[in-house]
Image (cartoon, rainbow, N blue to C red):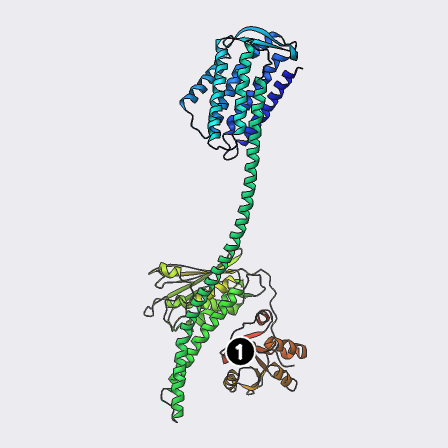
Amino acid sequence: MTIAALISMLGAAMGIVVAGLAFGFSTAPGWRDTRWFAVVGVGSGFYTGLNSLATLRDVPERYIVATSPWLVHFAMLYAVGLLFYSCRRLQRKLGKLDYALAGAAIAVGLVSLIPGAAFTGEVFYSDVRWLGLRYVIARTSLLGDVSLMIIVAISITCFVYFLRALRKGGEGLQAHCLGVGLMMVTILVDSITSTGVINMPYVADAGFVVLVALVGANLTGRFVGSATALDQLKNELELRVEQRTGQLAEVNEQLMRAEKLAALGQLSAGVAHEINNPAAAVSANLKYLERALQQGKVPDDARASIAESLDSVRRIARVVRQLLDAGRSAAAAAKPTELIFNVRNAFEASVRLALRASERKVDIQLDVPKSLRAVGEQHVLEQVFTNVIVNAIHAIPKERTDGRIQIHAHETSTHVVVSVKDNGIGMSDETQRRVFEPFFTTRSLDEGTGLGLPVSLGLLRAVDGNLSFESELGIGTTASIELQRAPELIAQPRGHAVAEVPQGKRRSLLLIEDDSNVRNAVSRLLSDRFEVLVCEGPTEALGVLEKGRFDVVLCDVMMSGEGGPGFYRELQYRDPGLAKRVIFFTAGITNAEHRAFIEHANVQVLHKPIDVSELVRFAEGLPSIR
């Protein structure tokens, strides 16, 4: 194999490889111009590959004649690709000259495939004795000579384009100018060599190789630079995203704090409104009675003043209790529980309580199967049912005599669904949107606080339940209560033996309370039902219990030290039987450990202010004294 054939084959391989790389680059954003250089690579690769036959020894002349038209065809393909690539690379619109040259090249490339169009069918030999080379060259016709001129014209045009752009400060164009310029020179040298004026080897193949190599290297460097810049940009973006994420987290935290403060402000305003009004009534009545007693007389309306004060205190207690329930429902995690209740029994109790609370004549139809059981604490969910029923009762105007509430329940595979339907005035769209908004109520201040439904929703969701409403003005409202259905087999808790108290004998009660005002007031309140002994704290109470026993121990939860829970644990260690007769009472639990104790310990809890009848009921359910 001659050196010329080796160069041609090397050029063919390089052209195909660079064509593949250029086409691959062209799929990346901003690299579409390299698609035309892939055409350049294909044209130069096939041209140099076929042209290697001219320098190989012992190649039949008919092969040279047969492949020569394809040389012109691929040379024209190369020329068109180079012209289009140059314009795309320089972001230059194709002009009339460009279209004329491209059209001529395409036409000549296609016509050259016609036998005898570009070549005469004869060959001649060109010897370069000082290199030991012999070329077998097909003799060109007029069309073949025209094809050579077209290649020269396109090469000159592209060289001029790149040279102008380079002089204007274009980057990465040096390799293009050098490659196209060398290609132009090699074609001119081959043209002169073919005339026999000079005895030189044909160097167009080498020109193809140099052009493809230079531009291919430039494209590779451009691609590497682009990838490097992209990687740097990615790193910068990641750093910037990390910084922005940190800033966003900080802003989000500030926003959450602001929202919490806003919510706290709204809650505080609502609580202040709901508590200050009845507190003002209590304060005014007490000052009025104090002034009358200082004057040595009891006013005629003393009973009315006391009744108003008690009613105001009940309103305050109701608001506080609902706030505590709201806090409990908000903090509760929806988790499985073993507590179940009979839905029918709970609704029967709730209906009785709602009718007593509303004092209205309403026909309530209860259609709840006795077999339905759901998950949850019955006394807690009775409050929910009562709230819903009371709302339904108050939705019916007082003057109406046909008020009707239908309570229907059924069970699905996973839930018990209860609907409470009334034929009241219904709710507007605005009311339905705000129905669960704290402190929003359509009732008077004496009838509602606006906390019942938000608290009820929270308590239901704490046991995987839900509460929703459908309403139409003038027709009525339907409340849908969803409860988690209880498993089929549930072990029923065993109750304690009820203490037997001799007829006429009052129970003994140990009261443990660190607030002197509360201690004295509760002691006076319970003195007509119990034999009361008071203690200021757990330490004093444990000392008293070492000397005597009591039927009931009423203990505050929040006290100094370990408070009520600490007292209860110590009492369990000393006297487990007596520990079962402890009833706790509280105005609100702010300590997380105390709250966890009350939630998980099997103890009775009352809320301040004390309801004597409720305390008596709890006391009657305590175990007997052994």
Q: Position of residue 519 (x, y in %)?
A: 53, 84
Horizontal side, residue 493 vs residue 356: left or right: right
The extreme left residue here reads: 399
* Residue 451 in view, yes or no: no
Q: Residue at x 48, y 60 (%)?
A: 254
The quadrant of the image that shows the N terminus is top right
The quadrant of the image that shows the C terminus is bottom right
**The image quarter in which residue 127 lies:** top right
Front one among 115 and 583: 115
For mark 1, give the secondary structure.
helix
10 Å crowding of disc 1: few (<14), some (14-19), many (20+): few
Query: Which residue type does callout 1 highlight?
Result: Arg
| Residue indicated by mark 1 | 617
**The image quarter in which residue 553 lies:** bottom right
Q: Residue at x 40, y 70 (%)?
A: 448
517 over 232 or under it: above or below: below
Front one among 87 and 493: 87
Q: Position of residue 104 (x, y in %)?
A: 45, 17
